[in-house]
Amino acid sequence: MKKKKQSNYVAAGIAIGTAIGAAIGITMDNLAIGIPLGIVFGAAIGYTIKKKVGNR
């Protein structure tokens, strides 16, 4: 059960990162770059939070 909860942080990070990346992509008139960058940054943030929570 603990692994399932921790994986939610990565999924939430990807979802938030995709939204932010889409907004940046629309601003730059290039969604093809904004969305993947948002996914990468969101996954990195979610993984970092997962590691912090997992050490408790």
Image (cartoon, grey):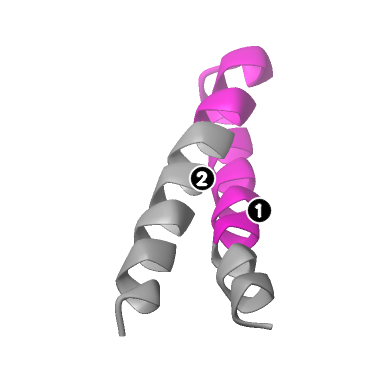
Q: Report whether 19 appears left or right of 44.
A: right
Magenta residues, as a range? 10-37
Q: Report whether 11 appears left or right of 9.
A: right
In-front residue for pair 47/2: 2
Identify which residue is drawn at 62% across, 64% down.
7
Residue pointed to by mark 2: 43
Q: In which quarter of the image is residue 3?
A: bottom right
Q: Position of residue 38 (x, y in %)?
A: 53, 36
Magenta-span inclusion, residue 6: no
Q: Position of residue 26 (x, y in %)?
A: 62, 28
In-front residue for pair 16/47: 47
Viewer-nearest of labels 2 and 1?
Answer: 2
Q: Position of residue 36 (x, y in %)?
A: 60, 25
Q: In which quarter of the image is residue 48?
A: bottom left
- Label 2 sits on what residue type? Ala
Q: Where is residue 55 in the image (x, y as percent from the top left)?
A: 30, 76
In-front residue for pair 8/31: 8
Q: Report whether 53 appears left or right of 3.
A: left
Please tell me the numbered disc located at residue 15.
1
The count of marks equals 2
- Label 1 sits on what residue type? Ala
Between marks 2 and 1, how big is the CA–CA gap? 9 Å
Identify which residue is drawn at 65% across, 57% down.
11
**Neighbour class for label 2 at 10 Å: few (<14), some, many (≥20)?**
many
